[in-house]
Image (cartoon, rainbow, N blue to C red):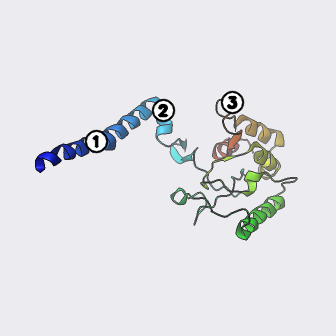
């Protein structure tokens, strides 16, 4: 009987080594060689200290900064350990109340006109680091006033940090909130 099971055990061991160790190490090695920053999480450093990733949003609440889109991760906003959608449907009263509350907060902060959809709704993961150009544009006046800088300077920063769709047509134009807020800190006050 062992004679019949030996090839099966050998094959399982061989495939475990190849697919469980060899393949992951090969892919990691290729990624580290070709794109080391992305392979290590697209980390952003300031003064030699890691302050975030360009792939995960952060919760900015001060008027001096651009606000990200809402996050539904709990217990803390943008908690990557709890990345999930809210599972609330379009007819959910809880969702309606949360969106209405967010819109009221944004209107109270000085945003006029229609509120962009991403300003009031969370992304599927709750971790999206980007906002739409419309949401960024709606916040320019508030940020410029809080920092006591000309709106034109803030508008220029937003334009400089506008990311176009991949290959010109995959996705939507977007602005990375963390990178934009770091650039804001370099403006003269």
Q: Earlier in the sequence, mark 3 or mark 1?
A: 1
- Between the C-alphas of marks 1 and 2, the distance is 28 Å
Q: Which mark is residue 15?
A: 1
Classify 10 Å Cα crowding around label 2: few (below 14), some (14-19), many (20 and above). Answer: few
Q: Position of residue 110 (x, y in %)?
A: 84, 56
Q: Residue at x 68, y 57 (%)?
A: 70
- What's the distance in space between the residues labelled 3 and 1, CA to CA? 41 Å
Q: Residue at x 12, y 51 (%)?
A: 1
Q: Residue at the bottom extreme?
A: 93
Of residue 159 and residue 95, the one placed in the foreground of this image is 95
Q: Name the residue tied to disc 3.
A: 168
Circles 3, 1 touching at the beta carbon (< 8 Å): no
Calculate the distance from the C-alpha at mark 3 to the C-alpha at mark 2.
Answer: 21 Å
Instruction: Indicate which label's residue lies in the foreground, 3 or 1.
Output: 1
Numbered label attached to residue 35: 2
- Closer to the camera: disc 3 or disc 2? 3
The spot of residue 136 in percent (x, y) is: 76, 46
Q: Residue at x 69, y 63 (%)?
A: 89
Q: Quadrant of residue 78?
A: bottom right
Mark 1 Cα within 10 Å, few/some/many (few <14, many 20+)? Answer: few
Q: Is residue 71 above or below residue 164?
A: below
Q: Position of residue 115 (x, y in %)?
A: 81, 54
Considering the image in quadrants, where does the C terminus appear? top right
**As rendered, which of 31 and 51 lies closer to the eye?**
31
Q: Front-most of 179 and 166?
A: 166
- SS of the residue at dot 2? loop
């Amino acid at each position: 009987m062992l004679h019949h099971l030996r090839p099966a055990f050998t094959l399982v061991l061989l495939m475990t080594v190849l697919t469980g160790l060899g393949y992951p190490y090969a892919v990691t090695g290729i990624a580290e060689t070709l794109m080391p920053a992305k392979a290590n999480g697209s980390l952003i450093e300031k003064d030699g200290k890691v302050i975030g990733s360009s792939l995960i949003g952060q919760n900015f609440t001060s008027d001096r900064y651009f606000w990200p889109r809402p996050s539904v991760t709990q217990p803390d906003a943008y908690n990557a350990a709890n990345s999930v959608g809210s599972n609330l449907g379009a007819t959910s009263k809880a969702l309606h109340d949360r969106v209405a509350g967010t819109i009221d907060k944004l209107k109270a902060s000085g945003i006029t006109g229609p509120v962009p959809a991403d300003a009031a709704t969370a992304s599927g993961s709750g971790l999206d680091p980007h906002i739409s150009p419309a949401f960024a544009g709606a916040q320019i006046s508030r940020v410029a006033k809080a920092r006591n800088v000309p709106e034109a300077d803030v508008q220029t920063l937003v334009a400089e940090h506008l990311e176009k769709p991949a290959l010109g047509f995959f996705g939507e134009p977007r602005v990375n909130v963390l990178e934009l807020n770091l650039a804001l800190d370099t403006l003269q006050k």
